Image (tube, rainbow, N blue to C red):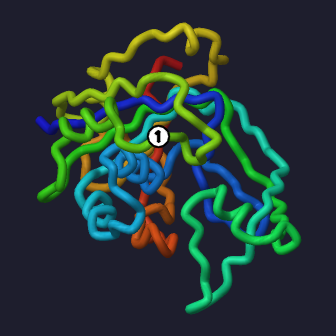
Amino acid sequence: MKEYLIFRLYGSMASWGDIAVGEVRPSYTHPSKSAVLGLIAAALGISRDQESLHQSLADSYGFAVRIDNVGQPLSDYHTAQVPPSGTGRKRTIFATRRDEIVTLPREKLKTILSKRDYRMDALVSVVLWERALPPYSLEKLAEALKYPDYVLYLGRKSCPLALPMEAQVVAADTLLEALGKARFTDFVELSDLPDRGRPVLYWEENVNAGIVPQHTFERRDIPLSRQRWQFEVRREYHASYPGED
């Protein structure tokens, strides 16, 4: 048997970034591995400049996610004022959003226009498992998710969690069995979610999913550098959850 860490993510809004080009900021229907590892790192109190720890997280844990409710899509036409950051040795780093808008005179601020996609009322179950020499046990990760060092959010700071994640560690032979053993509270906030059909499962290589994959995708979501915003390609399998037709 293998041990699995399982927790749920739910919010009124979530945004799971896809590859962004120009002013369009799309969202996947489910969280990327880099988004979940970023959430784990925030819970543990790991800052963005601690590159070796982020790399260790990426190398040490397997990842899967079940979409329990895909939610409704929402697009927002977004405007934001930002200062010029400069280039090279003259590049300016701002510590806070307040610094960005008060450091320079107002006439030097620029306006950025973008279209940002979100998912409303989406519910997913995340699964992590250990690989060789993980820096933290699954129990430590579960404890950090219950008492995080930094504020956690669902892809963007404007998307806070709406319910407890109820992180738990279960032992099972397959991903499907592990998800079946997880126990979550029937929160009233989830009772009115529209029926979206069967859940679907996405998982990465080298794990017994307990289900035959129907599709294989490539997703660029293994973090290489949080500071430089660089990611590597990962293979992801997909299948509809078993059920009666």
Relative depth, front residue between 69 and 78: 78
Q: Is residue 238 left or right of residue 110?
A: left
Q: Is residue 56 visible?
A: yes
Amino acid on which disc 1 is placed = Leu
**Relative vertical location of residue 189 with respect to residue 142 in this rendering, above or below:** above
Residue 191: x %, y % from top left: 58, 9
How many numbered dots are placed on residues in this image? 1
Residue occupying the point 49% across, 22% down: 163
Q: Which residue is mark 1?
A: 152
Residue 132: x %, y % from top left: 14, 58
Q: Secondary structure at mark 1?
A: loop
Q: Is residue 24 left or right of residue 147?
A: right
> Image quadrant of residue 105?
bottom right
Relative depth, front residue between 163 and 30: 163
Residue occupying the point 67% across, 78% down: 85
Residue occupying the point 79% across, 57% down: 80
